Image (spheres, rainbow, N blue to C red):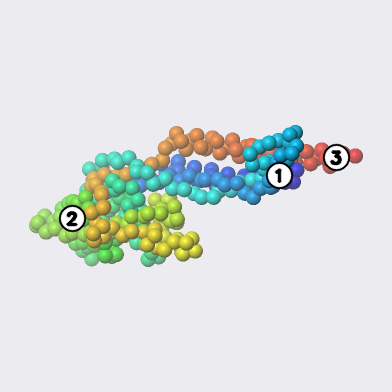
Amino acid sequence: MIRTMNTAANTLGQLQIQLDTISNNIANSNTVGYKTKQANFQELLYQQFNNDEQDPTVRQSPVGIRYGVGAHVSQIQSNENQGSLQLTGRNLDFAFTQSNQYFNVAMQDGSTAYTRQGNFYMSPQGDGTNLLVTGDGYPVLSANGTSITFPEGVSGFTMSEAGTLNVDYADGQVIQFDLAVTQITKPQVMEHLNNGAYISVPNNLQELGYAEGDVLTELQGLNRNEVSMQIGTLESSNVDISKEMTDLIAAQRSYQFNSRAITLADQMLGLINGIR
């Protein structure tokens, strides 16, 4: 009975992680550029009783009889499928039309993060210049790794498909910036920040068996023609609400089942202790 309770308790804690993941997906269903996450489970250590092939009365299952101790979340997998594109008509809204391509932004601690959120804004700096920032206020980086600043008095913006931002002025002056674009080839090893719309390279990347070049590819120079983005458009999240609700119901049923297993084991222990 104690083993039954431990097995159910182990699984309950992991089911809570799945419930939190599903809840986060639903909460970010309207977040620009958000990629849905899925909790994948794996069986914990189990005890196996092999078949006795000489005794025909013994159950003859292919792998024998397994007595497990629960399950755990082996990976929170990110779904990198392209979200639907929504036309906004705003000249500081940008969306990638290829998967696994990300804008570079500077975080408060000086590190670089990556995002698919392309709703940018001008932030006046008080010295006659504007800073290009994300909706959360993080500076957008150019291809040379610096923040994008330009004089005030902008009349409009245009963008080439390869990610060159043109800042136009009424006197005909045009200032060009190549936005820093990174292709993340292994998004599953990245660390998720804030609401999940920002990701960064984990500090223990080498411990995971990867070099930074195995995970990130800077789309600069000859690789620049691989960039594909569209102005006046935003990428919606790829959250499927109907699937998330179905997964939520299934997770809740599993949670109830394991909770019931603990209750029944407790009742049986009570009956055994009550035997005189």
Position above or below: 200 against 253: below
- Amino acid, disc 3: Gly
Residue at horizontal 71%, vertical 44%?
A: 49
- CB under 8 Å between callouts 2 and 1? no
Q: Residues within 10 Å of mark 2 (few under 14, many from 20)?
A: some
Question: Closer to the N terminus: mark 3 or mark 2?
Answer: 2
Image position of 274 (left or right of 67): right
Marks 2 and 1, Cα distance to the nearest angstrom? 69 Å
- Indicate which disc residue 152 carries: none
Residue at horizontal 45%, vertical 46%?
A: 37
Of badges 2 and 1, nearer the viewer stands: 1
Q: Quadrant of the N terminus?
A: top right
For label 3, the SS is: loop
**Viewer can see residue 9:** no
- Indicate which disc residue 274 carries: 3
The answer to which of 179 and 45 lies nearer the viewer is: 45
Percent x, y for residue 202? Answer: 45, 61
- Indicate which disc residue 49 carries: 1
Image position of 142 (left or right of 20): left
Percent x, y for residue 140? Answer: 30, 58
The answer to which of 194 and 49 lies nearer the viewer is: 49
**Residue with the mark numbered 2:** 166
Image position of 174 (left or right of 90): left
Of badges 1 and 3, nearer the viewer stands: 1
The answer to which of 65 and 31 lies nearer the viewer is: 65
